[in-house]
Structure formats: structure tokens, C-alpha cells
Amino acid sequence: MRCLGLLSLACALGAVGQPQRPADTFSSSAGPVKITVIRHASLMIEAGGKVIHVDPWSQGNYEGLPKADLILITDIHGDHLDPKTIAQLRQPSTAVIAPEAVAKTVVDAKVIHNGEHTEWGDWKIEAIPMYNLKRGPSAGQLYHEKGRGNGYVLTYGATRFYIAGDTEGVTEMRTLKAIDVAFIPMNLPYTMTPEEAADAVRAFHPKVVYPYHYRNADTQAFAKALDGSGIDVRLRNWYY
Ligand SMILES: [Zn+2]
């Protein structure tokens, strides 16, 4: 935060320095997993002394955060693939796992395609298709074509985390099994509405769900649409 103009009062009250990043810790049979909200589609996962950055983007505030042991990238768009921030978070030993389209830019990334899986440390990493069903920049085109990007299911111990990427409520999402924690996008025109997102989430029924990649979408409408579902909806500020 810059201490300018109307923000000067907030600065004077101590709102400067380390941002108060929302974070939650989940227990798993392999130990705790801490997930920190950074911004938009960017998040950080810490477990077993290792750090995973997902879709790191320069619009997030990385000040004071640890560098990555693993960087996971979902797609080629600038809010997911940001070479500058990837370089900033990399160490010589850092691995990058990404879809093939991303490896054109991050040439040493380990590529996994939709439907494939790999292992990294104590994590199992599965690539889940992410794509538009109907929304695109013009007739006959889609913002995200099937096969280009990867959502991910990350398993640690027996706990399964789903990071959907930029997608509509596709069959591959709706038929996921045993997801503990899900991160679901909802912004137009690129992904889907909060109501469509809630409908897809009801279908695979994670224990916990976070709206992310939502911009100005109405996340309260998403929460309301899941009332009575038994799903723990966690609204966090991803644009602090
Ligand atoms: Zn995006």
C-alpha cells in the first residue's frame, strides 16, 4: 500500500507493512497444509517445509513471502503466467509444473497434460481439464479451449485440494470425487456466474469451497446458492 492521499489515515493507523493475507490451515494425515490467499488466482501452499506458489502474478504482493520449491501454472493468460514473478520466486532447485502451452514460455517446465498425473515430493498432482463451454471473445471461439490449460487436484496425505483454473462448470469438475477443499472461479465473461459455479460445486460437493478469480462477481450470491448444501463456503478478500 502506498501512503498517499486518502490512504494516509490507514497508513497512520498501521495498515502499512506486511499485508494481512487471509490464510487457513488444514490438517491432513501427512501433516498441516497452510494456504495463503495472495490475489485473484494466486495462492501459496505450505506443507512439510515446502512452498508451492500457484499462478504467481505481479499484481499480488509477494513482499516477505518465501520463494517457491514448486510453481504450478494453469494457463497462458497474463493473470496466470507471469514470467517476471516466476523468475522472482524461483531458486535453482525450484520445479515448475505446467501445461504444454505454458512450456513455450517457461521452457524448462515439467509438462503434464489434461488427465495425466505426476508426483512431486509428498504431493500427487493431477491435471484436470479447464475450459469454456460457451463463453468466448467472438462466435465460435472460446476464451479457454479444452486441452490448453490445467486445473489441478493436489493430494497430500489423504487430503485433496482442487484448484479449478479458468473454467466453466465442466463435466470433469462436476464428476470429481472426494475433494476436501476447492478453489472455484466466477467472473464474467471469462469463466462463469456465481450461480453456475454453485451449481457445479453442488455436483461434486467439496467439504470446503473458496470463490477465487472472482473480480467484481457477487460471491454472496454464490454462498447463498449453496445454503443448506452442507458445504463450508469461505469468502475471503482476494483483492486486498
Ligand atoms: Zn484468469
Image: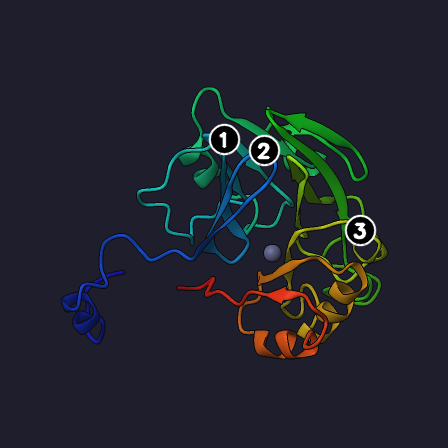
Quickly name the residue at label 3. 176
Q: Is residue 122 above or below residue 129?
A: above
Residue at point 78% right, 52% down?
145
Camera-side residue of 184 and 87: 184
Residue found at the very far left of the displayed protein = 12
Quickly name the residue at label 2. 30
Camera-side residue of 235 and 212: 235
Residue 237 is situated, as x and y percent measured from the top left of the image, at 46, 65
Along the horizontal axis of the image, is 32 left or right of 188?
left
Residue 91 is situated, as x and y percent measured from the top left of the image, at 43, 25
Residue at point 44% right, 40% down?
85
Kind of residue indicated by mark 1: Gly
Give the class, few, some or many, for how many residues have Cα within 10 Å of label 3's Cα (few <14, many ≥20): some
CB within 8 Å, label 2 to label 1: yes
Residue at point 67% right, 58% down?
207
Q: Counting residues from the N terminus, which is met first, the one under dot 1 or under dot 3? A: 1
Q: Quadrant of residue 194?
A: bottom right
In front of the other: label 2 or label 3?
2
Residue 8 is situated, as x and y percent measured from the top left of the image, at 17, 70
Beta carbon at label 1 within 8 Å of ligand 1: no
